[in-house]
Image (cartoon, grey):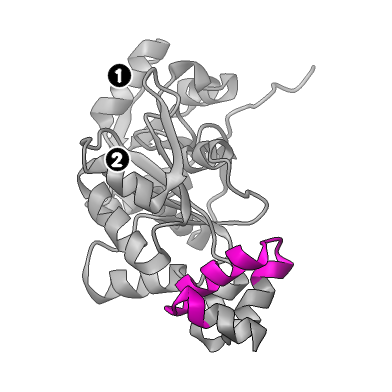
């Protein structure tokens, strides 16, 4: 007899990705898993119930979120050890990415409980592919610290990052985050602001940080955002440790005309264009 494909195994935790907007993005494997596991751990059982209802699935739900993860995690792993199967889902996208599912997977690892992933939609990957920015190397940062020293230190570290990096942000915090990015990275750094991904009103704005600040001074942010930010160049990382001549040479080697290289160097080092130009002909 041919073995059943994608058979649900007792004692296994299934990390199941769900749609971030478009219900059609759910996979056949995810539907089968949600239909056949013994129970489902959900970040918000009301949201998950709506998803299951739309799929014609009736299943026992348990609450697992940031505020109850320690107690709920122990109860879930106890049931797994006894041989039940469980799927963990988040409100949208892939669990364990900026999500307390990370802790449940770690707890299962500690207790030698097998875990497998049912892959699917993920907001930051979707945004990255739409950004128009380099994707060969990137860093996922998720949500920045809200305020204080930790936030300043995180932003300062990102200012030294040469890879594309990806942030999540809530609409009511977007303007403040853009202002902070501008202070650390400058207004000319390229970004892609992605909102309502896979939904009817999907929007991807490819612009500079300065242009984004200008736009949102006149438009109120709506929906959850994924911000994809261009990494810095080597010369930006070295900053004021480079001499004007070294900076001009770097920019010229990267393809700029001498005039543009002088302008870029003046901006980088806080000098006048004339002073930089004089140094190049002396």
Q: Position of residue 260 (x, y in %)?
A: 59, 63
Element under disc 1: helix
- 277 sits to left or right of 225: right
Residue depicted at 27% across the width and 31% down the height: 45
- 230 sits to left or right of 62: right
Q: Position of residue 150 (x, y in %)?
A: 29, 73
Q: Position of residue 259 (x, y in %)?
A: 61, 65
Element under disc 2: helix
Residue depicted at 37% across the width and 68% down the height: 184
Q: Nearer the viewer, mark 1 or mark 2?
A: 2
Can you identify the residue that label 1 sits on? 50
Label 1 crowd (10 A; few <14 / some 14-19 / many >=20): few
Nearer-the-camera pick, 74 or 174: 174
Can you identify the residue that label 2 sits on? 215
Q: Are marks 1 and 2 in contact (CB under 8 Å)?
A: no
> On screen, 219 above or below 190?
above
Give how far apart the Cα atoms at labels 1 and 2 are.
35 Å
In magenta segment, residue 114: no
In which quadrant will I find the C terminus? bottom right
> On screen, 104 above or below 246?
above
> On screen, 78 above or below 187?
above
Residue 82 visible in this rendered orientation of the protein = no
């Amino acid at each position: 007899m041919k073995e059943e494909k994608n058979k649900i195994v007792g004692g296994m935790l299934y990390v199941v990705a769900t749609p971030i907007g478009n219900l059609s993005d759910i996979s056949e494997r995810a539907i089968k898993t949600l239909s056949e596991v013994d129970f489902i751990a959900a970040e918000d059982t009301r949201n998950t119930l709506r998803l299951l209802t739309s799929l014609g699935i009736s299943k026992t739900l348990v609450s697992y979120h940031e505020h109850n993860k320690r107690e709920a995690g122990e109860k879930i792993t106890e049931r797994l050890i006894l041989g039940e199967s469980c799927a963990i889902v988040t409100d949208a996208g892939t669990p364990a990415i900026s999500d307390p599912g990370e802790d449940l997977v770690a707890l299962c690892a500690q207790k030698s409980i097998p875990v497998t992933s049912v892959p699917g939609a993920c907001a930051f990957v979707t945004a990255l592919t739409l950004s128009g920015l380099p994707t060969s190397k990137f860093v996922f940062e998720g949500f920045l610290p809200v305020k204080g020293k930790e936030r300043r230190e995180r932003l300062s570290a990102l200012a030294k990052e040469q890879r594309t990096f990806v942030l999540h942000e809530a609409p009511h915090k977007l303007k403040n985050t853009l202002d902070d990015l501008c202070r650390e990275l400058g207004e000319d750094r390229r970004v892609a602001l992605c909102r309502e991904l896979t939904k009817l009103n999907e929007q991807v704005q490819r612009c500079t940080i300065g242009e984004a600040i200008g736009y949102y001074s006149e438009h109120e942010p709506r929906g959850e955002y994924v911000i994809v930010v261009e990494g810095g160049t080597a010369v930006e990382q070295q900053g004021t440790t480079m001499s004007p001549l070294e900076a001009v040479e770097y920019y010229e080697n990267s393809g700029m005309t001498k005039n543009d290289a002088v302008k870029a160097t003046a901006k980088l080092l806080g000098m006048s264009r004339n002073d930089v130009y004089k140094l190049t002909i002396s």
